[in-house]
Each structure stands twice: as structure tokens, then as C-alpha cells.
Image (spheres, rainbow, N blue to C red):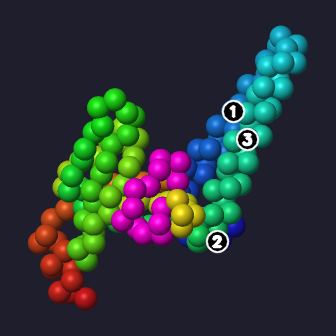
């Protein structure tokens, strides 16, 4: 259990919310079964809870083993695709490396803010093994908004070190 406390906040939040949703599915199905004696709803809610808990197990295995990739940088450009549910994001890391990401349009980003993204590892044939490649939405584990970027803060913090 002590390893869970060392997880990044975004990943811990996603894991806990997924577990809570799975428990909610199961609780709703059991309550409906006792109230309405509906076995079909019980089976469906049990199936949803099972798949949600399997997803939680998958997230737990990836995060506890540290087998996730972190991409951090300042959002420089957002391009919304017109008839698709995706947006292209260009992040510039502090060391000058560009990261191009493909995210869901519902992911709200602001140009000039710093973000940290956590991704599942992908096959090299699928992503070419490069952190600059486009990443599909289903590999995204979590995201943190680190606030607005200020060059003066970065230069003063690097001088203190």
C-alpha cells in the first residue's frame, strides 16, 4: 500500500474514480435486484463492474510497475479537427523538444499553460517509439495542469539549484 501513496496525483485520482464507478455499478445492480427482482439488470451491472475492475487492475499494474511515459511541456499550439472528435496539441518541453499529441476534443487545454501527460507504453510499430509521435486517446492515463508558464520563474528556479 505504501507504493500507492507515491503515485502521481492524476493517476491515483483516475484509479480511485474508476474503482468507485465499478462499485457504483455493482451496488446499483444489487439494489435493483432486491427492489425489482430484475436478474438481467443484475447481470448487466455485474458485467460493467467486472470490466471496470479489470480496467482498474490494468491501471494498477502499469502504474505500480512504473511502466508509463511522462510527457511534460508548455502548450504552444492547438488545432481542432473539424469533423473529428480529436485535437492536435503541440507541447514544447523546457529542454526544447516538441511533442505532438492527439487528444479528445473534450480535453480542455489552454495555450501557455504547462501540462504533464501520463501515457501507457505502446508498441513501437504503433507509435514508432518516439515521444514526439501522435498518441491515441486510449493510451492516455492521466493529465495534470501545472498552471501558466512564466519564463522568469523557470530562470530563477534554475539559478537557485
Which residues are the magenta region?
A: 127-139
Which residue is most to the top? Answer: 36
Q: What is the C-alpha distance between the residues marked 3 and 1?
A: 13 Å
Task: Tell me the quarter of the picture where residue 22 sits.
Answer: top right
Q: Residue 65 has which mark?
A: 2
Which residue is most to the front? Answer: 125
- The secondary structure type at the circle numbered 2 is helix
Q: What is the C-alpha distance between the residues marked 3 and 2?
A: 21 Å
Residue 35 shown in magenta: no
- The secondary structure type at the circle numbered 1 is helix
Residue 89 at x, y percent in the picture = 30, 51
Q: Nearer the viewer, residue 144 or 126?
A: 126
Q: Nearer the viewer, residue 121 or 63?
A: 121
- Residue 35 in view of the camera: yes
* Left or right side of 30 for 52: left
The residue that label 1 is drawn on is 24
Residue 57 at x, y percent in the picture = 71, 54
Task: Tell me the quarter of the picture where residue 48 sits.
Answer: top right
Q: Residue 63 has which mark?
A: none
Image point 30% across, 37% down: which residue?
81
Q: Is residue 35 above or below residue 86?
A: above
Query: Which quadrant of the figure contains the C terminus?
Result: bottom left
- Label 1 Cα neighbours within 10 Å, binned few <14 / some 14-19 / many ≥20: some
Image point 21% across, 52% down: which residue?
77
Which residue is most to the left? Answer: 152
* Marks 2 and 1 in Cβ contact (< 8 Å): no
The residue that label 3 is drawn on is 51
Dominant secondary structure (helix, strand or loop) of the stretch shown in magenta:
loop
Image point 79% across, 19% down: which residue?
41
Instruction: Give the tally of numbered discs.
Output: 3
Q: Is residue 131 above or below residue 148?
A: below
Amino acid at each position: 500500500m505504501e507504493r500507492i501513496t507515491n503515485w502521481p496525483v492524476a493517476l491515483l485520482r483516475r484509479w480511485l474514480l474508476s474503482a468507485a464507478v465499478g462499485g457504483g455499478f455493482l451496488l446499483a445492480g444489487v439494489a435493483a435486484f432486491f427492489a425489482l427482482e430484475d436478474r438481467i439488470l443484475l447481470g448487466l451491472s455485474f458485467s460493467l463492474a467486472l470490466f471496470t475492475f479489470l480496467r482498474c487492475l490494468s491501471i494498477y499494474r502499469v502504474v505500480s510497475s512504473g511502466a508509463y511515459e511522462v510527457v511534460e511541456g508548455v502548450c504552444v499550439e492547438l488545432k481542432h479537427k473539424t469533423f473529428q472528435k480529436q485535437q492536435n496539441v503541440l507541447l514544447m518541453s523546457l529542454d526544447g523538444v516538441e511533442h505532438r499529441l492527439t487528444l479528445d476534443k473534450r480535453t480542455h487545454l489552454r495555450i501557455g499553460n504547462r501540462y504533464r501527460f501520463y501515457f501507457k507504453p505502446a508498441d513501437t510499430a504503433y507509435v514508432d517509439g518516439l515521444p514526439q509521435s501522435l498518441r491515441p486517446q486510449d493510451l492516455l492515463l492521466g493529465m495534470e495542469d501545472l498552471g501558466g508558464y512564466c519564463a522568469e520563474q523557470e530562470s530563477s528556479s534554475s539559478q537557485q539549484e
